[in-house]
Image (cartoon, helix red, strand yellow):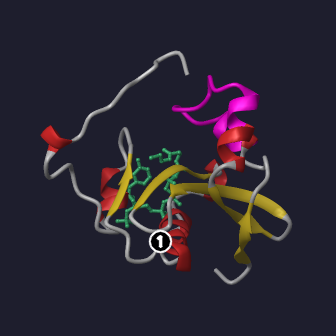
Amino acid sequence: MNIFGIVGVFRSCNGLVFLSRSYWAKNRSRERVVLCLQKSLCFGLYKGGRQIGLARVVTDSSTFAYLGDVYVLEEYQHRGLGKWLVSVVMAHPDLQGLRVWCLLTRDAHELYKQFGFTELKFPARWMEKLDPSK
Ligand SMILES: CC(C)(COP(=O)(O)OP(=O)(O)OC[C@H]1O[C@@H](n2cnc3c(N)ncnc32)[C@H](O)[C@@H]1OP(=O)(O)O)[C@@H](O)C(=O)NCCC(=O)NCCS
């Protein structure tokens, strides 16, 4: 495991390759991908000099954080790296003591449950405004 490293927190567009492969962002324009990464707290997972994973957090560093775009490159999946990436993200000093963490997932609920995420306790209190074209 020690040849892998989270090489700091970065603000760049290295996530483009990952997001273009994801089921949720494959139709996101390049401009929107770059913007969402620039405005987020981004984490890269590296093997040597090659980026093999990504996660990002949208947060006020005080009360709320949204975890998104968690991705480990296919050939490195199922080795514990996704769990390690999420654990490093959640241990970041700017993300401690928050009231709410939230995320969206189609099928990885069991991954996030290991970090304390649950289904919505009060779904009636949550609202959303979706634009399916974005
Ligand atoms: C999801 C993803 C980040 C997990 O990373 P990984 O390195 O493959 O996963 P890990 O080896 O760390 O193990 C993940 C654990 O969650 C579980 N899990 C539950 N749902 C899962 C899912 N949809 N995909 C992967 N793992 C899942 C695994 O079984 C494993 O359980 P374990 O602790 O009992 O071994 C990675 O598979 C990935 O990038 N997938 C494609 C993009 C994606 O779906 N991202 C999540 C969007 S919410």
Q: In this view, does 94 lie above or below 58?
A: below
Indicate which quadrant contains ligand 1.
bottom left
| Residue that protrudes farthest toward the top in the picture | 133
Residue at 39% across / 64% down in the picture?
63
Residue at 66% across / 57% down in the picture?
53
Image x and y of residue 101, in percent? 36, 60
Residue at 68% across / 84% down in the picture?
2
Segment colored magenta: 17-33
Pointer 1 residue: 90
| Residue that protrudes farthest toward the bottom in the picture | 2
Image x and y of residue 17, in percent? 74, 41
The answer to which quarter of the image holds residue 50 is: bottom right
Picture quarter with the C terminus: top right
Determine whether the residue tagged by mark 1 lies in a helix, strand or loop.
helix
Image x and y of residue 16, in percent? 74, 40
Picture quarter with the N terminus: bottom right
Q: Which amino acid does label 1 sit on?
A: Met
- Check residue 58 for magenta coloring: no
Work out whether residue 16 or residue 126 is closer to the camera in this orientation and state it: 126
Q: In this view, does 130 lie above or below 85?
A: above
Mark 1 closeness class: few <14, some 14–19, many ≥20 residues within 10 Å: some
Q: Is residue 93 left or right of residue 109?
A: right
Work out whether residue 19 or residue 73 is closer to the camera in this orientation and state it: 19
Q: In this view, does 125 lie above or below 86?
A: above
Residue at 78% across / 46% down in the picture?
13
